Image (cartoon, rainbow, N blue to C red):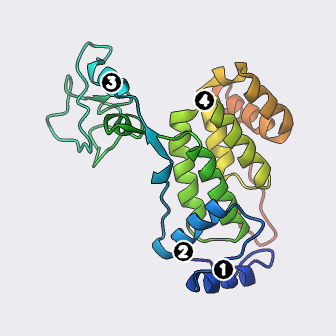
Amino acid sequence: MFSQAGKNGTDSAVLTLYQEAAESKVDLPEDDPAIVKLLIQFLYENDYETKDLTIKSDTRAAKALRASRSPSDFEFLLDFPHTCSGDCRYPFHAICPHHYCTNCNGTCVNFVCGICAPILEGTEINRTTLLVHSKMYEIADKYDVNGLKDLARTNFSALCAIFWDKDVFAQAAEHALSSTPDSDDGLREVIRQIIISHIELLNKSDIAELLSKHTDFVFSVLRRVAEEKAGLKPKAKTTSRTGSW
């Protein structure tokens, strides 16, 4: 679950963490206790849950969702989990406002919309969960926890797609850019793609303030836009002394 050798001398800290977890006593005074708790859960279960961060949803939201219709004036299926079959072709392809089976080419397997499903269940994801996933990525990087960084990145990416237009996106992005080195592109790539996909974010004052603090990241965003929109050739990778890329 952890790599065999930690980085920056963290291998001994990882061993101590294992020992203290086994004794139900973990002492990491510099870290958020709630994040440490999720870290311990990952050690035992290879996963972490944030169900306690869901909040009750207004029932009117579920009614409005069920009453909504597609641009072609079809009702949404709103049946999760959804697995594609020969029956989900047009006009039965509108699963929910955020997913059409024409987009996945009929390859859905147990698809559950992270936005619609919680609303229909009477709960919704607390926006602060996005920041939690950024903190999980940070602690995984700090203690070199094998697998946790990938999981935190996947969770972070999924919620960014939901909350990109909320204030918490700027807060989580600030934490992600400040808590990891510029060379770590894990969460940076997610944030970069969100900004490029929703360029209107540049009109938000909190995003403008965020970008003013992280000029190297701004350059990476501009370069990606130039590559995708203006045909700029991607920067060539350099060969290291060991001959690897």
Q: What is the CA distance from the residue labelled 2 to the residue labelled 1?
A: 10 Å
Q: Where is residue 235 in the image (x, y as percent from the top left)?
A: 75, 44
Name above or below for residue 43 compared with residue 32. Answer: below
Q: In which quarter of the image is the N terminus?
A: bottom right
The residue identified by callout 3 is: 65
Decide: few, some or many residues near mark 2? Use Cα within 10 Å; few <14, some 14-19, many ≥20: some
Residue drawn at point x = 73 percent, y = 35 percent: 221
Q: Position of residue 208 (x, y in %)?
A: 78, 26
Give me the disc on residue 17: 1
Give the mark nearer the N terminus: 4 vs 1.
1
Check contact, mark 1 vs mark 3: CB within 8 A: no
Residue drawn at point x = 84 percent, y = 32 percent: 212
Give me the disc on residue 43: 2
Left or right side of 32 for 79: left
Three-letter amino acid code at disc 2? Answer: Leu
Q: Position of residue 109 (x, y in %)?
A: 28, 48
Instruction: Report helix, strand or loop for mark 1.
Output: helix
Give the mark nearer the N terminus: 2 vs 1.
1
Give me the disc on residue 47: none
Left or right side of 88 for 245: right
Check contact, mark 4 vs mark 1: CB within 8 A: no
Q: What is the CA distance from the residue labelled 4 to the residue labelled 3?
A: 20 Å
Three-letter amino acid code at disc 3? Answer: Leu
Q: Quadrant of the C terminus?
A: bottom right
Q: What is the CA distance from the residue labelled 1 to the residue labelled 3?
A: 45 Å
